Amino acid sequence: MRARLTRKHLIIISILMLIIIVTAIIVVTRQTAVPNKGETEVILPSTIQSRENETESRVEVKDEPVSTVDPATLSSVDIQPFGITVSYVKGIPGFEYTIHRSANQTEYVDFSSAELIGTKCTDDTGVFASITKNPSSDEDKTLLISMTKVGDDSYGLSLPESICTSNVQLFDQFQASFKDAFGTLKAISMTDVTE
């Protein structure tokens, strides 16, 4: 009788150990997984820290003239991983941003709004603008409507078509807000970071 209990205990312990090992392998695999070539790796979840724009612009312009938008009409959001402050014309509803890295290591930030999500396209996320950091490939550059330089880095603005959204008027307002203020793109100053 005693030998049977021991054998049952050994079987139960073996099964538990196997479950623990399989669970550990799954956890480690998910943490170290590398995205497939066609997939995009999300670097930072959507967060927004808006504040009023400063009047001073530290932007070196490459293809786009310095914005003539009145600084009092602007608000801004810091994109910490890029080290930049993106301005936009006030008056648009709230939005989110998500930073991505493509398979060829190009980094870009998508700006989106739940109010722009349409029913015409599968998996529409309401993206109305993207900023690409150091666009390198010809494909990246052909999508850009504007380029600017901040420090040693180049940034390009892309505005997708409105084919997916069900609210084209609001979509156009979001895009105009970002396009009009793109010339004010600047580096995050050290005083902004420490406040």
Image (spheres, rainbow, N blue to C red):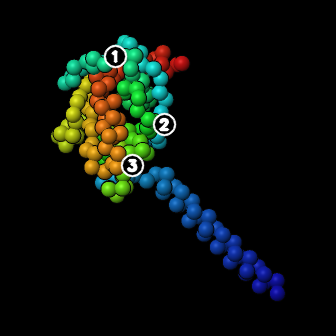
From mark 1 to mark 2, how far is it between C-alphas? 26 Å
Name the residue: 32% across, 56% down.
120
Mark 2: amino acid: Thr
From mark 3 to mark 1, how far is it between C-alphas? 30 Å
Task: Look at the numbered disc 2 and give the secondary structure of its residue.
Answer: loop
Residue identifier under label 3: 117
Residue 148 x/y as whole percent: 25, 25
From mark 2 to mark 3, how far is it between C-alphas? 18 Å
**Is label 1 or label 2 in front?**
1
Compared across the picture, whether 5 is left or right of 123 comes to right
The answer to the question of whether label 1 and label 2 lie on touching residues, with beta carbons closer than 8 A, is no
In the displayed structure, would residue 146 be above or below residue 103?
above
Residue 89 x/y as whole percent: 37, 26
Q: Nearer the viewer, residue 142 or 122?
A: 122
Name the residue: 64% across, 68% down.
17
Residue lying furthest right in this view? 1
In the displayed structure, would residue 82 be above or below residue 142?
above
Question: What crowding class fits label 2: few (fewer than 14 Cα within 10 Å), some (14-19), or many (20 or more)?
Answer: some
Sequence-wise first label, 2 or 3: 2
Quadrant of the snapshot with the C terminus: top right
Mark 3: amino acid: Ile
Mark 1: amino acid: Asp
Residue identifier under label 2: 47
Name the residue: 28% across, 45% down.
162
Residue 182 x/y as whole percent: 30, 26
